[in-house]
Amino acid sequence: MSDYAGIALIITAIFGGLTSLGTILTAYLANRAATKTKEVKEALEKSDRSRDGKLDAIHVLVNNNMQVQLQVAATALRELATTTGIAAHVRAAEQAEQALADHKQKQAVVDAVEQTQET
C-alpha cells in the first residue's frame, strides 16, 4: 500500500470516527433536550393547575360579591321608588332589577357549564 493510500485510510477512519462521534453527541444532546422539555412541560402543567384553581376561586368570589351588590342596589332603589314615586327613581329601580336578573341568568349558565364539566 502506498503512503497516500495509508494516509487516505487514516483520514477516512478519523472522519468516520468523527461522524460516529457526532452522531452519538447529537443523540445525547437530543435526549437531554427531550428530558428538559418534558420537565418544563410538567412544571408548567402543575403551575397551570394551581393557577386555574386560584382563578376559579377568585371568579366565584367576585361573582358572589357582584350579585350581593346588585341585590342591595335593586332593593334600595325599589324602596326609594316606592317611597317617592318619582319616575326617575322608578326607572332606576327597574334598571337595577334588570341588571340583577341579567347577572343571575348569566351566572346560571356558567354554573350549568361548570357542573357539566365536573361530571
Image (cartoon, rainbow, N blue to C red):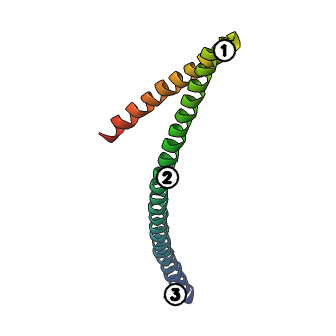
Query: In the rendered image, which residue does mark 1 sit on?
Result: 84
Q: Front-most of 18 and 81?
A: 81
Q: Is residue 84 left or right of residue 47?
A: right
Q: Residue 95: image x %, image y %?
A: 61, 18
Labelled disc at residue 112: none
Number of callouts in the render? 3
For label 3, the SS is helix
Residue pointed to by mark 3: 6
> Counting residues from the N terminus, which is met first, the one under dot 1 or under dot 3?
3
Q: In terms of image quadrants, where is residue 79?
A: top right
Marks 2 and 3, Cα distance to the nearest angstrom?
71 Å
Residue that sits furthest to the front in the current view? 83
Q: Amino acid at mark 2?
A: Lys
Asked if one can make out residue 95 in the rendered structure from this viewpoint, the answer is: no
How far apart marks 1 and 3 lie (CA) works out to 112 Å
Q: Residue at x 41, y 34 (%)?
A: 111
| Position of residue 80 measured from the top left corner of the image (x, y, whole percent) | 63, 20
Q: Nearer the viewer, mark 2 or mark 3?
A: 2
Q: Is residue 60 left or right of residue 112?
A: right
Which residue is under mark 2?
54
Q: Amino acid at mark 1?
A: Thr
Q: Quadrant of the C terminus?
A: top left
Label 3 environment density (alpha carbons within 10 Å; few <14, some 14–19, many ≥20) = few
Q: Residue at x 55, y 86 (%)?
A: 7
Seen from the viewer's position, the closer of residues 103 and 68 is 68
Looking at the rendered structure, the secondary structure element under dot 1 is helix
Q: Residues within 10 Å of mark 1 (few under 14, many from 20)?
A: few
- Amino acid under disc 3: Gly
Q: Earlier in the sequence, mark 2 or mark 3?
A: 3
- Compared to residue 85, the image places residue 21 above or below, namely below
